[in-house]
Amino acid sequence: MASSSRRRFIYQTSLFAGLFSFRKVASASSVAPVNPSGPIVLSTWSHGIPANVAAWEILAKGGRSLDAVEAGVRIPEADPNVTSVGLGGYPDRDGHVTLDACIMDEFANCGSVACLEHIVHPISIARLVMEKTPHVMLVGEGALKFALDNGYKKTNLLTPESEQHWKEWLKDANYKPVVNWENHDTIGMIALDSKGNLSGACTTSGMAYKLHGRVGDSPIIGAGLYVDNEVGAATATGVGEEVIRICGSHLVVELMRQGASPGDACREAVERIVKKQPQRSKELQVGFLALNKHGEFGSFCLQKGFNFAVKSDLHDNSLFDSKSHY
Ligand code: ASP
């Protein structure tokens, strides 16, 4: 991100060689099968608060975590004031609002859509991909056709406010995205239900003013989201390219499988980004959020400012500030 031009967030793809360290493995069978403290739901950023309310309505009645995460993230998807998810999301540089989303359940069923236009609820299309097709991922025109074939209607997702912001951006050759706000507000939601089953959902309009066709980490199973019902679930927010490079959410879950706490697993994933590209990691945000099978949770991020909302019988849906590397 050295260039001062508006293309500054189109990153070079070269990687530093990195040394990997592995922790001594603890057996996943040591993980308790059922969460002792009841259901819990966690979501990234402050728009996670109303999302958690919707998810909790399902979890509190003994509902399935999959239904909870879908219902939860539909709230910011439909909120035109959330400019990083769904309706009202900032467009790409050509003025298209293109949405990415994925969902995953306790059986490792998963579905995903990427670069989907005109549909307010990409998470529900991702769930349909999971449940009605033999595939995991549909993109672009094919994803839109699938949504329309399944009864969804086209909506103009570009609100006047987001269009205005985009037009301002077009004028400003020195534009620089604002860390922790403009580019980093995916909602990732992970939940454990009263039966002890985990699910997750992740949905975003992605990086503001990206190249048309750019897909980030959020719809990529293993990058923006991963769920393993034996172990835990993780989700990511921030610059998706960095998360994809390390298969971030899968890495966090695998570290938990090896015995790491959710917080330590998130920290190790963030440190891996720092170790590979120390200079670049100073200028961007990535945050991970993780929940294990016991209902324990943790997070870690690169820069201060990432927060998340937690709702359970023990947590009142207020925001936690994540620990950070810098
Ligand atoms: N991870 C998303 C992406 O790269 C951005 C975000 O978290 O807001 O598309």
Image (spheres, rainbow, N blue to C red):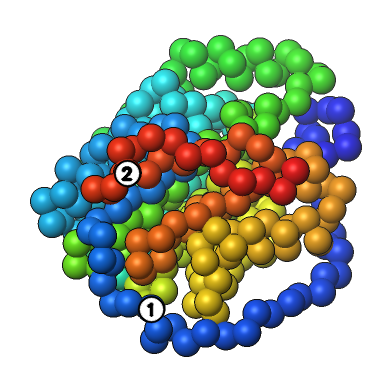
Q: Is residue 5 among the parts visible in the rendering?
A: yes
Residue 30, above or below 144 = below
**Front residue of this view, candidates 43 and 14:** 43
Compute the Cα span from label 1 to label 2. 22 Å
Q: Quadrant of the N terminus?
A: top right
Residue at image mark 2: 315
Mark 1, secondary structure of its residue: loop
Judged left or right of residue 86, residue 33 is left
Q: Quadrant of the C terminus?
A: top right
Q: Position of residue 274 (x, y in %)?
A: 78, 56
Residue 27, above or below 38 = below
**Front residue of this view, candidates 158 and 127:** 127
**Front residue of this view, candidates 242 and 118:** 242
Q: Position of residue 164 (x, y in %)?
A: 56, 12
Q: Is residue 221 among the parts visible in the rendering?
A: no
View extreme (left): residue: 61
Q: Which mark is residue 177?
A: none
Q: Position of residue 139 (x, y in %)?
A: 47, 53
Residue 129, above or below 125 = below
How crowded is the residue under tag 1: few (<14 C-alpha within 10 Å), some, or many (20+)? Answer: some
Judged left or right of residue 320, residue 38 is left
User: Given the image, on which type of amino acid does mark 2 rest?
Assistant: His
Q: Which mark is residue 31?
A: 1
* CB contact under 8 Å: marks 1 and 2: no
Q: Is mark 1 within 8 Å of ligand 1?
A: no
Q: Position of residue 239 (x, y in %)?
A: 65, 45
Judged left or right of residue 236, residue 230 is left
Residue located 86% across and 28% down the image: 4
Residue located 69% across and 80% down the image: 22
User: Given the image, on which type of amino acid does mark 1 rest?
Assistant: Val
Mark 2, secondary structure of its residue: loop
Residue 211, above or below 172 = below
